[in-house]
Structure formats: structure tokens, C-alpha cells
Amino acid sequence: MIVGGVQWMTLLDYPDHIAATVFTAGCNFRCPFCHNPELVLPELVSQSSAGLDESFFTELEARKGFLDAVVISGGEPTLQPDLPKILARIKSLGYLIKLDTNGSRPDLIHRILESGWVDFVAMDIKAPPDTYDELSGSSVDISAIEASIATIARLAPRYEFRTTVAPGLSQDDLIRIADWIESGQGYWLQEFQVPVDKALVDEGYRDKTALRRDDLEAVWDRLRDRFDSGGVRG
Ligand code: SF4
């Protein structure tokens, strides 16, 4: 597994648990608003990434009892050929595992969930189907996104869908995304925040205007009955 780094303690990435987060390197999307270009753009990935080695597992063993969960994030983790093997090994150490994914590889997500390696899946929904390519910066197979939504809702012990409300997304777009998901455990609207000290995949998005928090709260008021949990977060 090629990684851009490991954050050894976070209270934010796995709700209700103290987790370590592994940032896998490489992504098949080019979301223009993404603020992790070093995990996405090949020329930057090659400068800042390395293989996950034995020292990671030694450290995980040592931190058992203090940490109780591991988050595999990215980049896009499902592109890593040894992801199943890594998940199985982390699971054998007794950790909860959360997987963050863009949902582009439903067959692998299905396999992972059927194997019981992952306890929580968070999937990004970038946009309504008709503007998915624009906000993912890629040519996306919408049927794969739909298959992932259905598989996660059916098999994941715990899951959430989430949309970063990037410039270009309207309140109606967010309602259309929710209509697409229909209902389920969790849906979060994430405010688009421009990082001061990091680059964006497309720097042209730095000066674009996105919906404000008040707008998102108004949308969430229309959606809250459909989901067990969710809301607006920064
Ligand atoms: S935000 Fe988009 S480009 Fe960035 S890591 Fe996630 S899926 Fe890849």
C-alpha cells in the first residue's frame, strides 16, 4: 500500500473512537476543490509517498488500548491492490476499521464488506448524476456510484454519505443528491473551506463562491427526516 502519511491520533475521523488515519496515495478522480493534491496528482504523489511497512503494524500493536480504530482514507484507498490484505491484518489486531471512499469500485467495496473487515464506510457523493464529471474532474461511471451506494446501504454495519458543497452546487442540487441516495443511516453536508496553507487540485476554485452555512442548514432542515443522522459540518 502506497501512503502519503499516517496521523497517529485523531478524534475527528472515526466518530466516537480514537483512531489512527492512513492516507493512501493516488486517486482516480480529480475533484477541482480537493485540498490534498499531494495524494492525487501523480507528479506530487511520487514525491511524497512511500510503502506502508512493518513499522506501521509494530506501532499499531504498541498503541492497542490507547487507539481503538484505524481509518483508511486517501487519495482513494480502493485503488491499492493490497487493500484487502492490509484490512485483514489490521482487523486481526482487534481494531475497528473505517474506510473512506469515492465509491468508484463497487465490486471491491462489496468484497470488503462481505468479508467483515470494515465496520464503517464513508462515501463521498460529489454531485447529482448529471454534473458528476464536472465536480469529480473525471469521466465517472455513474452506474458504479449507484452500485456502491446500494452496496454500502445494504452491507455496511455503519455508514455515511457526505457531500462537500463545492462551488457550483446549488441547494436544488443537494436535494437531488439526497433524492438519489433516498434515505439511510447518515448524510452530511460539508462546507467548502479554502485551506490557507495548502494547494487545491484546481487553484481556480480558491476564489469561487460556495453556498454558506445558513444555506446548508436550510437544506438540511428539508432532509433531516430521511436520515438517522447527519447535518452540516465544517
Ligand atoms: S476529493 Fe476527489 S480528488 Fe481528492 S482524494 Fe477525494 S476523490 Fe480524490
Image: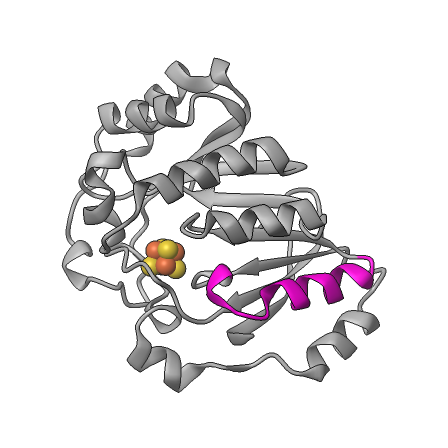
Q: Main secondary structure of the magenta part?
A: helix
Residue at point 33%, 32% (across, down): 213
Residue displayed at 76% across by 59% down: 91
Residue reaching furthest to the right: 65
Quarter of the rendering containing residue 216: top left
The magenta segment: 78-94
Query: Which image quadrant shows ligand 1?
Result: bottom left
Q: Position of residue 190 (x, y in %)?
A: 39, 40
Q: Is residue 96 visible?
A: yes
Q: Check residue 77 for magenta coloring.
A: no
Residue 81 vs residue 139: left or right? right
Image coords of residue 39 (percent x, y): 40, 70
Residue 87 located within the stretch drawn in magenta: yes
Q: Quadrant of residue 29?
A: bottom left
Residue 109 higher or lower than 45, as above or below? above
Give the residue displayed 53% in from the left and 37% down from the top. Answer: 151
